[in-house]
Amino acid sequence: MTEIPEHLRKRAEAAKAKAQAAAGGDTPAGDAPSADSPAGTAPAGDEKIPSHLLDRGTAAADMPATPAGVPAVPVGGSGPDGHNQRLLTVVKSGSIQDIRATPVDKVHVWPHLLVAEFLAALAITLFTLLFSIFVNAPLLELADFNKTPNPSKAPWYFLGLQELLTMFHPMVAGVTIPGIGLFLLIMAPYIDKNPSKRPEDRKFAICLMTIHLTFWAVLVMIGSFFRGPGFNFVFPWNAGLFFEL
Amino acid sequence: MADDKKSGGMSQLSEQVQASQAWSSIFRPGSIFRKGYSDSPRNRSYVIMNSVLYHLHPVKVKRHAVKVSYTLCLGGLSFFLFIHLTVTGIFLMFFYRPTAAQAWNDIQTLQTAVGFGLLVRNMHRWAAHLMVLSVFLHMARVFYHGAYKPPREFNWVIGVMLLQFTLLLSFTGYLLPWDQLALWAVTVGTNMMGFTPVFGEQVRFVLLGGVEIGTDTLLRWYTLHVLMLPFVLVIFLAIHFWRVRKDGGISGPL
């Protein structure tokens, strides 16, 4: 037999005695559960846990830990043969699976979407091709720094801004107003907190956008067709068209 | 008889080709080019799943999403016009040198001496104007449908950026013919940008590559037009398309 060193034997005995003392303290049946028992503090107010499960869980928490062999004290909800079932956790159905009652009506991308896209691409190609056969892109004479055309116009999509130049200081017309407009446009989803998408619920937003778009469209139209030499207001049916695309 | 023999030879050849390693390395297992196509729900899914289209489209979309009356195809058309402009633009690049001495002559030569030169230049120009229009209308459509509302807020922001890149692409292309129209339209435009508070002079200088429009401006805008802006636009497009799918497809009915 191997000799056990004295200090190790002493430590083992001390540990054994401590374990016995601890077990003895817990053994008495019917002892009240400790106040901080984790199962005892189950969230009773949670309406998603079925009440019978909740009852069982609370009952199991009331059961003391009994060493094997000692008959279980009959408490309502404990299983047969003295098995204590303790409810550890209830996984709520909504947290891991989302059951949709209404299936979404879906169609296959091929052919339903791809055919539509292909036809649209074909149509626009045909349109540009035909338009290009009959209408030539402008190519005026060579650029000449000494010959300023009258009027000088920006590309059509900037003519609204050029139109503003006739009314405001260039910094306001060319930078401030378009800058603020662009900023508001980018921020639109964060400014418009109205959750509804129905037109009847968002009259204000629709009005605002329509006024904005109409404002720009009118400015671009005036800049394109109603501005002649010196960027003065003219009627195209009197003075002719001063517009190149 | 001769016909039978001929078609028999053809089908034998196509069988051999389809059994080859080269063929099966090109088309994924399940591709309709490997196993043939007959109309069935399974094969309809395979058309998308086993092709590069899967990067752009899911296998199925909401029935509502394929209604042309809802989308008016505007986003798709904007993208298609961008592809169209890239193809025609590459053709134009073969015949164009971005210097003040050569640019205008190159375009003149392109229109008069190059086969289909005038037609392709016309298509490039008209498609460019159409793209500005379709991107703008796409934005209006999205706004009126309230499609920018959660969870699609950020995709709206990306979309407004795309609108700005479209305008910049069009504007940088405007200078390249180096004719009177180009020069003075750009003069008006860049003068306006020169009024940016505080940095006005610097903004103008950077844009023009000097104190006034010249051959340096032409080179700078050419590079922006054919390389930098399309590059940035494609990155934003990728994010835009990816977000459309991640946010649950296009927005639902009103």
Image: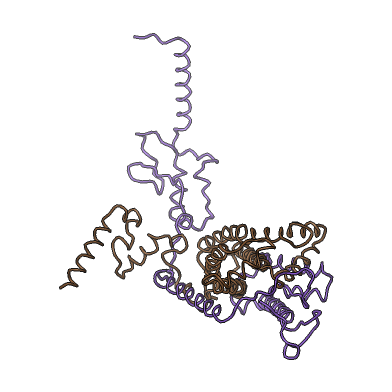
Q: From the viewer's perspective, tell me whether residue A88 is left or right of residue A183.
A: left
Whether residue A175 is visible: no
- Judging depth in this view, the residue of A198 and A183 nearest the camera is A183
Reply above or below: A175 against A11. below
Locate the N terminus of chain B by quadrant.
bottom left
Q: Position of residue B234 (x, y in %)?
A: 56, 60
Q: Position of residue B77 (x, y in %)?
A: 53, 72
Reply above or below: B208 against A36. below
Q: Residue furthest left?
A: B1
Residue in view at x 79 percent, y 84 percent: A233
Q: Position of residue A218 (x, y in %)?
A: 72, 81
- Judging depth in this view, the residue of B242 and B182 nearest the camera is B182
- Judging depth in this view, the residue of B118 and B242 nearest the camera is B118
Q: From the viewer's perspective, tell me whether residue B74 is left or right of residue B160.
A: left
Q: How many marks?
A: 0
Residue in view at x 33 percent, y 68 percent: B41
Q: Residue furthest right?
A: A169
Whether residue A161 is visible: yes
To which quarter of the image does residue B103 belong? bottom right
Reply above or below: B186 against A237. above
To which quarter of the image does residue B108 belong? bottom right
- Judging depth in this view, the residue of B97 and B91 nearest the camera is B97
Residue in view at x 72 percent, y 82 percent: A242
Residue in view at x 75 percent, y 63 percent: B213
Locate the C terminus of chain B by quadrant.
bottom right
Q: Which colour denotes chain A?
A: purple
Q: How is the image coloured?
A: by chain
Q: Which colour denotes chain B?
A: brown
To which quarter of the image does residue B190 belong? bottom right
Q: Position of residue B79 (x, y in %)?
A: 54, 67
